Image (cartoon, rainbow, N blue to C red):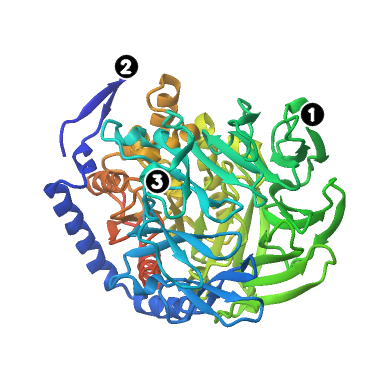
Amino acid sequence: MDNTRDVLFGTTVEDPYRWLEDGASPEVTRWIAEQDEFARARLAGLPERAAIAARMKELSYVESVESPVKRGNRYFWWKRGPKQEKKVFYWKEGPDGAEHVLLDPNTWSTNGNLSLVDVFVSWDGNWAAYNTSTNNNDVTTLRLIGVRTGKRSEIDTIEGTQFGPISWNVTNDGFYYRFTPKDAAVPASEQMGTAELRFHRLGNDPKHDRLVHARTGDPNAFLYGASTQDGHWLFAYISRNWSSNDAYIQDLRKPGGFTSLAVGAKAQYDLKEYRDRIYILTNEGAPHSRVFVADPARPVRAAWKEIVPERSDAALDSMEIIGGKLVLGYLKDATSRLEVHELDGTLTREISLPELGHATVSGSAEDPVAYVQFESFTHPREIFETNVRTGETKSWYRSKVPVSPERFVVEQVWYPSKDGTRIPMFLIHAKDLRKDGTAPVYLYGYGGFNVSVTPSFNASFFPWLERGGVVALPNLRGGGEFGEPWHRAGMLHSKQNVFDDFYGAAEYLIREGYTRPEKMMARGGSNGGLLVGAAITQRPDLFRVVLCEVPILDMLRFDSTPAGKLAAEEYGSPKKADDFRALFAYSPYHHVIVGKRYPSTLVLSADSDDRVDPMHARKFVAAMQARSAGGPVFLRVERNAGHLGADLVGASVERIADMEAFALSELARPMPAAH
């Protein structure tokens, strides 16, 4: 604890745990180790932990397969075997060829700290560019491997490819990629603005790669690009938040640079090209989004033609061109609908789904075969192969997970938030649940960055459900479930709406007899960690236990890191007076009061998290441990792990066992008396 304080816009702000921001200092390193050792010793002895870990192993160590991608005559897909820790990238020649392993990260290191992040196969299926990282963090290295030979290139290795897809050219001898130069003169918090779009020719020294689009110079901007399969067009995007971007196009068949397609509007644009027409999915002037087609020879906005108008009953969430058709994904009350349209926008058919759930579709522009990946809360992943021209559909793969979905029911309910806004919420529980206020409730929320919470299969819910619990997932404002207005209603100065929506969910569950505050657990991670951090400090009366994962909690210093800068468009900037006042009003770290009875809290952090700095978790835990008069406060630190964990099944099993055992143990104990 120190005497650090800042005077910001006339307000004195105490920051007694500023010293915990320096994760490399010996003092902080020692503090972290002691906190983690103490937490793990306490968690290891919890009554339910061994049983939950055993059940999670049964649920997690199962075969997992993802939709295939066709390149040339070859098929590529991800699969993880029932005894493997990490998923493996496979290929085969033709639909009936023998399976071959192309990349198996399980063999790369003894402790599993080397990760395979993503793979991008050339159009002819002969090459694969792939990103690797250490400790599953966001900083990646790009490498190249020959598909048939399995030989890795020693030359084609590029450091600094953090965030961003690889896009191959039509001749399959080079690709476009996003590159972040290392520049000692640029502060860490400004480095996102130094990113460039570059082109790499196979076999050339990456030091001489051609600059395609220069850096923006704006640390709040995110630059990325993609080329089209026919090699005619290159797209570039500059995104300044999760609700708007600028879009540019370049004709690769002739000399010249980029042409502006959509610049300066407060809207999102997603481009697809087919036979020299640009199809544009946008929410410009249409909160639920619509589709235009544009002639790139005349790209001015006035010449665009609307082909799929906005719907009032569903938000248009995705657009693909598959087999010469438009395949559109809608969200209706937070559940998926898939439709096939002609290129003029005419509806052909709806793709049938097994039940209300979450579905994605993939395929290529000329091939009519598409793959639909579907899941719901009680339906493990199933992949369907469908022909977008004929409608013929068959099951291609279905996961086998040892659960009994017939035991449970999924409800969607609606409740009022503080300002009267109706909020939907999914509830999962046993069919014979009695509403007598005794069920332990697992309330999960996110509410930000245009991210939608949809019915996806999550194995970690089942140990809770099988113990008579209820899992509740409200669709908070700040997400994308109902288009951009829903997102904007939970960002910037309206962020308090998200928290109020969450409290409204808890109050509904109490009012309807599902549970009581002493049986309520709240869980959230990343931006959801901010959500539950606010719940701890604003409404401790509603929750007995909080699980707070890789959180953002110091809202006055979140933008001091590279990735944190990108969040300023969502939260606001603490360097602007109006934003400062809004942020300071709810910043969880700054609202921990001495002697207040707060919920029992487990904060989870990762030692190599480069997306959300672990200093947030450290500072908040220190403040809570010094000031709370409520339940215990623990800090668990995952080793060799990034923002999304350690990408090992075993690590996930251990983490879930610790979290749910802690929650159940605390729910079974009375809350310490208020002082």
Q: CA distance from mark 2 to mark 3?
A: 26 Å
Q: Point out which mark residue 533 bears.
A: 3
Q: Within 10 Å of the Cα at label 2, are there few (<14), some (14-19), or many (20+) other Cα atoms?
A: few
Q: Is residue 491 left or right of residue 674?
A: right
Q: CA distance from mark 3 to mark 1?
A: 48 Å
Quadrant of the image containing the N terminus: top left
Q: Which residue is mark 1?
A: 303
Q: Point out which mark residue 10 bears.
A: 2
Residue 632 position in % (x across, y down): 28, 57
Q: Is residue 109 left or right of residue 354?
A: left
Residue under the point 44% across and 46% down:
535
Mark before the other along the chain sequence, 2 or 3: 2
- Kind of element beneath mark 1: helix
**Marks 2 and 1 close (CB-CB < 8 Å):** no
Identified by mark 2, the residue type is Gly
Foreground residue, 120 or 609? 120
Residue under the point 45% across and 72% down:
150
Residue 92 position in % (x across, y down): 58, 76
Q: Within 10 Å of the Cα at label 3, are there few (<14), some (14-19), or many (20+) other Cα atoms?
A: many
- Up the image or down, 415 lies above or below 75; here it is above
Residue under the point 57% across and 83% down:
98
Mark before the other along the chain sequence, 3 or 1: 1
Q: CA distance from mark 2 to mark 1?
A: 51 Å
The mark closer to the camera, 2 or 1, is 1
Q: Within 10 Å of the Cα at label 1, are there few (<14), some (14-19), or many (20+) other Cα atoms?
A: few
- Kind of element beneath mark 2: loop
- Kind of element beneath mark 3: helix
The mark closer to the camera, 3 or 1, is 1
